[in-house]
Amino acid sequence: MTRREIREHLFLMLFRKEFHDNHDLMEQVKIYLSDLKEPTKEEGLYLNNRFQAILEKLTSIDDLLSEAASGWTLGRMGKVELTILRLAVFEMKFDEEMPVKVAINEAVELAKVFGGDDTPGFINGVLAKLA
């Protein structure tokens, strides 16, 4: 599985956070991982561990986003945009192996796939303030 595929899976897993409480979320993630046909056991474990690491840092991530997204509350953001930003901020601030420019670029690419026409520019603008 490529890094981009891993990132897309993490996005899809994290997106569920907006629709489920913590208990149901864990069940949803288990279902999602069991439905994947391509990952090895190690890749599934990596996805789950990475997902858990993001959830552990979510309060810090949301605080950083609230400061950077002037004029936007997290509740006002679209769920797709918020999820992409959360994933990117985790990579920028808490993943020492991920260069900031790569995290921003990959977030913009996710926005092109999953967001609307204005999403890539919005994502880029918010993340540029954090960089």
Image (cartoon, rainbow, N blue to C red):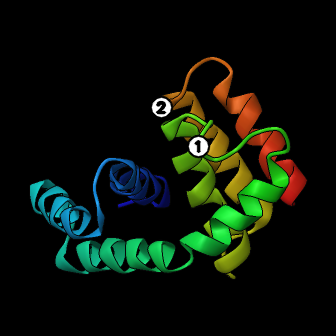
Q: Is residue 73 left or right of residue 53?
A: right
Mark 1 crowd level (few <14, some 14–19, many ≥20, 10 Å Cα): few
> Which residue is at a point 53% across and 28% down the rendered structure image?
115
**Secondary structure beneath label 1:** loop
Of labels 1 and 2, the one closer to you:
1
Q: Nearer the viewer, residue 36 or 118?
A: 118
**Which mark, by number, is residue 5?**
none
Count of residue discs: 2
Q: Nearer the viewer, residue 105 or 28?
A: 28
Residue 32, x across and y down, in percent:
18, 56
Q: Sequence-wise, which precedes: disc 1 or disc 2?
A: 1
> Which residue is at a point 34% across and 71% down the rendered structure image?
47
Residue 119 appears in which quarter of the rendering?
top right
Q: Which residue is mark 2?
A: 114
Query: Is 66 above or below relative to 73?
Result: below
Mark 2 crowd level (few <14, some 14–19, many ≥20, 10 Å Cα): some
**Secondary structure beneath label 2:** helix
Q: Which residue is mark 1?
A: 75
Residue ranking furthest to the top: 117
> Which residue is at a point 47% across and 31% down the rendered structure image?
114
Residue 51, x across and y down, in percent:
40, 71
Which amino acid type corresponds to the residue marked 2 in the rendered image?
Phe
Residue 13 appears in which quarter of the rendering?
bottom left
Which amino acid type corresponds to the residue marked 1 in the rendered image?
Gly
> Which quadrant is home to the C terminus?
bottom right
Residue 108, x across and y down, in percent:
66, 39
Q: Nearer the viewer, residue 17 or 12?
A: 17
Label 1, label 2: how far apart the Cα atoms are: 19 Å
> Which quadrant is home to the N terminus?
bottom left
